[in-house]
Image: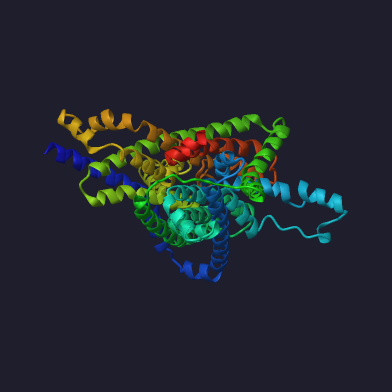
Amino acid sequence: MRSSAHSGGWNFFTLSLALLFALPFFSLLFTAASAEENVWVHLLSTVMPGYLKNTFWLMLGVGSGTLVLGVSTGWLISMTEFPGRRIMEWALLLPLAFPGYIIAMVYVELLEYSGPVQTQLRLWFGWQNFQDYWFPPVASIGGAVTMLSLVLYPYVYLLARTAFLQQPATLMEASRMLGKSSKNSFLHVSLPLARPAIVVGVSLAMMETLADFGTMQLFAVQTFTTGIYHTWFGAYNAPGAAQLALSLLMFISVFVFLERYSRKQQRSHTQNSIQTQHPRNSLSGIKAVAAPLFCLFPVVFGFALPAGLLIQWAANSWREVMLERFFSDAGNSLLLAGLTAVLAVLLGVLMVYGSRISKRRRIRWAARSVSLGYTFPGPVVALGVLLPFAWFDRTIDAWMQATFGISSGYLLSGTLVILVFAYLVRFLALAYGTVESGFGRITSEMEDASRSLGKNTWQTLKGVHVPLLRGSMLTAGLLVFVDVMKELPATLMLQPFNFSTLATRAYGYATEELLREASLWCLTIVVVGLFPVIFLNRQLRESAPQNLQDKDHD
């Protein structure tokens, strides 16, 4: 009976948390359905066709770009040997440190009409103005596709590289014995086997594209994400914004289903694969020169060049910027990121443990539903959180005025509470997934031994699980911390008055065309973003087949 009571308490706690973090989704449904006029018909006849068109071309472009860059570099790194391969192995991950909106800021400053590139071209060729020559527009769909492809291809690279390494070498040997060339073996053997992992990577890149706000806003590309922001803050049309948000979630649900299905297919493949020695094909001649140059291309344009420019601009302008403002914004970012990371790890541990000891399937499904929050773009989360919090504030304020004749003002809206809650809705999935993976390495025998010694569930969690989960908890906290530091749209929509973070201040400078002044803020975000890149590289090296690790160290 005692065990049943403890289990019932955990079930109630886990289900309550799951419902709490599902609140934004239910608030969007309620608001969209409560429209007094048919907003949906108006949206379909005005902005919706443009949103659909732009979103389609963005997804197609970014999907194609990340597919080509990610698969080709993953194959070269995992299956061939060339000069500089070990450096390229981790350098190809570096663009992950750049949020899309920051690399967009850099290239706008570099390539716009008054930027150094076009200015130098006019000096070299004697051109007087833009009518004398043609230069590809940076602020366009093509520019957005290029920027996002450069920073999102590592998703495909990571998964494709892992998939190639996990393929049994005997299959490639059999293909070569049947007279197939290296090219044909790749196209007809390795690529089909790695397809589930590649589809997952491309799907993640596309979902990030759907969720992007800063790049689209800077490049004036109208998508669902920017439309939600403008419908809410520009037209003050909450039902219209909610209906746009639900439309975007319909698109995202397709990719979530595709990703889940591909992961299931991949699991069945990797379980049957045997990791035998994978000898790398040593390249020579022109191939030995072309391979490192090809791998160097996304590293240079996705990380080295923009990082170098940010460093140069920061070094030249730091005396002119308000360092007091910078340190204030950095402190705000650290406060929000640190607080959210601690709460996310704590809640992640409690929810995973609650679903672990529960015997009910619906409790486990409810706990895992928090993973859906990561697929929601920032504006969707912000709108879904703001609507119920604003209703609560208005209700309390009306009651206080009717009862005591005083106004309570904003108790939750416009405070750090609503901002941290939005971050948790958005990023709790990172902590939950990482902690769940750590729990998977703890056997049930350990729990049984603790229970046999008279320990209850709380004591077992504190005495057995938490010490064994320290590594996973630190990893989860790091991932949440970095993502909160980079988050832009939700912070823009929910931040209190006279309160800015590194991301919102950098974006504010960019909208005022003060990109060089924003360099110190942008550079700080990029430096923080390097930590998970270092972590990912270490994880990749540890997960590689042992014979390849030994060979790399030789």
The quadrant in which residue 354 appears is: top left
Identify the residue at image location x=46%, y=54%. Answer: 172
Residue 17: image location, x then y, percent: 32, 44
Most extreme residue toward the right is: 126
Percent x, y of residue 461: 26, 33
Count of numbered circles on the image: 0
Whole-percent x and y of residue 165? 46, 47
Q: In the picture shown, does residue 89 fall above or below 553?
A: below
Q: What residue is shown at x 20% (from left), y 30% (from top)?
A: 450
In this rendering, is residue 62 above or below 308? below
Q: Is residue 328 above or below residue 514?
A: above
User: Is residue 550 something one can see in this rendering?
Assistant: yes
Q: Nearer the viewer, residue 306 or 514?
A: 306
Task: In the rendered view, tell whether residue 211 sits above or below residue 352.
Answer: below
Residue lying at the far left in this picture: please name it: 1
Q: Residue at x 49, y 45 (%)?
A: 279
Query: Closer to the camera, 221 or 382?
Result: 221
Question: What residue is rendered at 46% in x and 53% in y?
Answer: 173
The image position of residue 49, as x and y in percent, is 55, 68
Q: Quadrant of the N terminus?
A: top left
